[in-house]
Amino acid sequence: MSQALTVAKFGGTSVADFDAMNRSADVVLSDSSSRLVVLSAAAGVTNLLVSLAKGPEQAQRVFMLDEVRRIHHAIIERLAQPQIICDEIDRMLENITMLSEAAALATSNALTDELVSHGELMSSLLFVEILRQRGVNAQWFDIRKIMRTDDHFGRAEPDTLTLAELAGTQLKPRLDEALMVTQGFIGSEVKGRTTTLGRGGSDYTAALLGEALYASRIDIWTDVPGIYTTDPRIVPGAKRIDEITFEEAAEMATFGAKVLHPATLLPAVRNGIPVFVGSSKAPQAGGTRVCLESANPPLFRALALRRKQTLLTLHSLNMLHARGFLAEVFSILARHNISVDLITTSEVSVALTLDTTGSTSTEDNLLTQSLLTELSSLCRVEVEENLALVALIGNNLSQARGVGKEVFGVLEPFNLRLICYGASSYNLCFLVPGDDAEQVIQTLHNNLFD
Ligand code: ADP
Ligand code: ASP
Ligand code: MG
């Protein structure tokens, strides 16, 4: 029988500096099944690289390049033998400088992905060096050799069949020889150009590799010891959920709980691979197990928040034309490659939000001028920005009695801009003004979870 395999993924804060990397190395080494490590860029680095890719003016560029250099050199300086890796990191830093100069002349999504990928390339190189200097037989693996994606730069979709095949031949045999360390978030399209899977995509990489390599567990090590009833940054008294189903966790991720990338659970569910979420700072604190079934799933499970939502309200210009109006709206949206997220309708108007699940590395705006122009030829368009989507995640929500009163009764002081309830028994969601979002979450949490 082959040895059990756990894919262990560490997020930005878990590889933020030398000490964090060493704590994460301790976590890996404490479990002999953790034979494949997937890493994010060090905390803050992806944000800096995304900003550099927008081609900022020179003074800002120099400042940001210095910051990227400082973060990585601070780690190198703490190594017992810094010279081994220093040249390689400096080569990467030179590349970053060159690419950001090119971006200042003309930016593109392909260039952005190439630039941004350096964050994960550098963190994984440094992590291997830390392990080696601790006497571990660790090897660096360039995930772009196997993570084949389409060429939708900024939010590329992996080709899972090709990944399974390439992972089987190129990565699997090496797992028996050494502790393999690779990059999350990045991939490559068929011509070999670097792509990224969207912000927060390292979780997704870990799950895809878990699927491709028949892992027995996927561990997501982050800065919180598990999945909580809501973001503990908003409600410090939020409670840890010890065990949660795939469906519930996927709903949370889709509706904005940043702790997991929205696509992470798909590969895990497809193969029934349990996912564990814990803190690399406090591994002894335990975490959340995400699995197929959990005992007594509660009516109310968690609250999630997605910010920066835009609401489009479309009013048909012609009452007589109202039949077929929705069909026309949807065909325009489909032509622009946009899927609708929340929707409510009346006889001659429809209000909807555009699906911004996950976000692109290139920070594309879905609401383009050409979409607005085309919609305006059909109907009157109203655009409201800076709204927040609050989602209550639970079980059998649409069958239970009194849910409406319990939820909305306590939200009297707030303007609820749009409500969606009934399509899914796992969620109830609504829009509120962005500035009220945290207060709405706190109020609901106090009343439904405390
Ligand atoms: P990483 O860099 O490790 O991927 P992220 O910042 O992407 O970490 O995700 C962890 C963060 O997710 C936490 O610091 C927390 O603020 C946020 N978060 C949002 N919702 C939740 C939730 N329901 N439970 C736990 N953390 C949450
Ligand atoms: N480094 C990438 C980001 O910040 C991917 C990740 O952290 O998962 O979005
Ligand atoms: Mg993340």
Image (spheres, grey):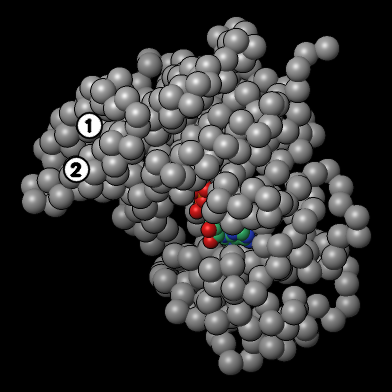
Q: Is residue 202 shown to the viewer in this render?
A: no
Percent from the top left, x then y, of residue 169? 60, 7
Asked which secondary structure carries label 2, the reply is helix
Quadrant of the displayed image that contains ligand 1: bottom right
- Do tag 1 and tag 2 residues touch (Cβ < 8 Å)? yes
Image quarter of the C terminus: bottom right
Q: Residue at (53%, 77%) from the top-left corner? A: 438
- The part of the image, by quadrant, that contains residue 144 is top left
Decide: few, some or many residues near mark 1? Use Cα within 10 Å; few <14, some 14-19, many ≥20: many
Percent from the top left, x then y, of residue 281? 55, 51
Q: Residue at (64%, 67%) from the top-left corner? A: 230
In this view, 346 is above or below 340: below
Along the line of sight, the residue nearer the viewer: 389 or 93: 93
Q: Farthest residue in the front direction?
A: 80
In this view, 71 is above or below 447: above
Label 2 amino acid? Leu
Asked which secondary structure carries label 1, the reply is helix
Q: Residue at (68%, 50%) from the top-left corner? A: 284
- The part of the image, by quadrant, that contains residue 224 is bottom right
Label 1 amino acid? Leu
For residue 65, the mark is 2
Q: Farthest residue in the bottom direction?
A: 413
Decide: few, some or many residues near mark 2? Use Cα within 10 Å; few <14, some 14-19, many ≥20: some
Mark 1 vs 2, N-terminal side: 2
Percent from the top left, x then y, of residue 267? 68, 33
> Disc 1 to disc 2, how far (Cα)?
8 Å
Q: Name the residue under label 1.
A: 93
For residue 265, the mark is none
Q: Is residue 214 shown to the viewer in this render?
A: yes
Along the line of sight, the residue nearer the viewer: 238 or 311: 238
